[in-house]
Amino acid sequence: MKARRQMKIQEIIAKQVIRTQEELADRASMDVTYLSDLERGRWNPALAMIVDLANGLEVHPSELLRELKVRPDDRSPARKRSQRQ
């Protein structure tokens, strides 16, 4: 399931004047190891990180999610929910 959710950061970088992961990480104000992990699908970024990446790439955040495919039978992992009394 992770493979379907991976962002195509490398394809977007190829269209930009950005030469290295280090340059993008600097422009997006994030650690280069975190960016590398995102590219390999090890982490799912929060919306704020997607916005930071988009700003670093000078694209709209929707460009990073354009090819995201969600099938109706995909189930989200169980999330902890706070119990309010």
Image (cartoon, rainbow, N blue to C red):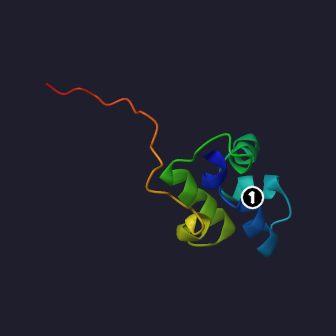
Q: Nearer the viewer, residue 58 or 83?
A: 83
Is 41 positioned to the left or the right of 77 in the image?
right
Three-letter amino acid code of the residue under disc 1: Leu
Residue 82, percent across and down? 28, 28
Secondary structure type for disc 1: helix
Residue 3, percent across and down? 67, 50
Residue 78 visible in rendering? yes
Is 15 positioned to the left or the right of 54 in the image?
right
Residue occupying image coordinates x 57% and y 62%: 68
Residue 38, percent across and down? 68, 47
Q: Is residue 61 above or below residue 73?
A: below
Residue occupying image coordinates x 49% and y 53%: 47
Residue occupying image coordinates x 54% and y 60%: 51
Q: Which residue is mark 1?
A: 24
Q: Is residue 26 above or below residue 58?
A: above
Residue 16 visible in rendering? no
* The C terminus lies in quadrant: top left
Q: Nearer the viewer, residue 70 or 57?
A: 70
Residue found farthest to the right: 19
